Image (cartoon, rainbow, N blue to C red):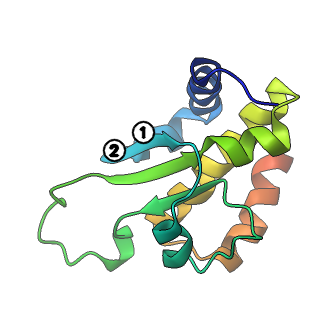
Amino acid sequence: MRRARSDFESCVVDAIAAIPEHLRVRFRNVAITIADAPTAAQRAAFDCTSEETMYGCYEGTPLTERDGDGEPLLPDRIVLFRRPLEADFGDDANRLRREIALTILHEFAHHVGITDEQLERLEQQWVDRGVVR
């Protein structure tokens, strides 16, 4: 179900608010933006085929790979892809907010250097522990 962009943006704001404060404060210098869908360049950068669904991506240098010469000039960013999220979860606003929050946490985990393998375990823990409502 497609929503007005402002409705989706409200879901993003609600999803960010649902992330516990002790995690949210670590988002310093990470912008969260919305795009309709991933570009061909984004798909290529993350080895994602056109058959695979991308809900978001992290663009930047993970903290574990920085050399300590100060903050980057531009903020790292998490890009949320509205159309795929709405296509899969848009008919249930609560589920959409939950998936947006999980996507933000997933991409933020890449910012702090967590691998996809580690994330598989963490995401279930986030749900089980109520980190994402």
Q: Is residue 129 visible?
A: no
For the C terminus, the image quarter is top right
Viewer-side residue, 26 vs 79:
79
Disc 2 and disc 1 in contact, CB within 8 angstroms: yes
Secondary structure under badge 1?
Answer: helix
**Total numbered circles:** 2
Where is residue 129? Give x, y as percent.
Answer: 80, 46
Nearer to us: label 2 or label 1: 2
Where is residue 82? Give x, y as percent.
Answer: 63, 41
Q: Is residue 120 visible?
A: yes
Res 100 quadrant in image: top right
The amino acid beneath tag 1 is Val
Q: Considering only vertical position in the picture, is 31 above or below 116? A: above
Residue at figure coordinates x 42%, y 47% from the top left:
26
The amino acid beneath tag 2 is Arg
Secondary structure under badge 2?
Answer: loop
Viewer-side residue, 5 vs 61:
5
**Residue farthest along the left direction in this orientation:** 69
Residue at figure coordinates x 83%, y 39% from the top left:
89
Q: Is residue 42 left or right of residue 69?
A: right
Q: Considering only vertical position in the picture, is 96 above or below 119? A: above
Residue at figure coordinates x 87%, y 28% from the top left:
92
Res 61 quadrant in image: bottom left
What residue would you read off at disc 1? Answer: 25
Where is residue 10? Give x, y as percent.
Answer: 60, 20
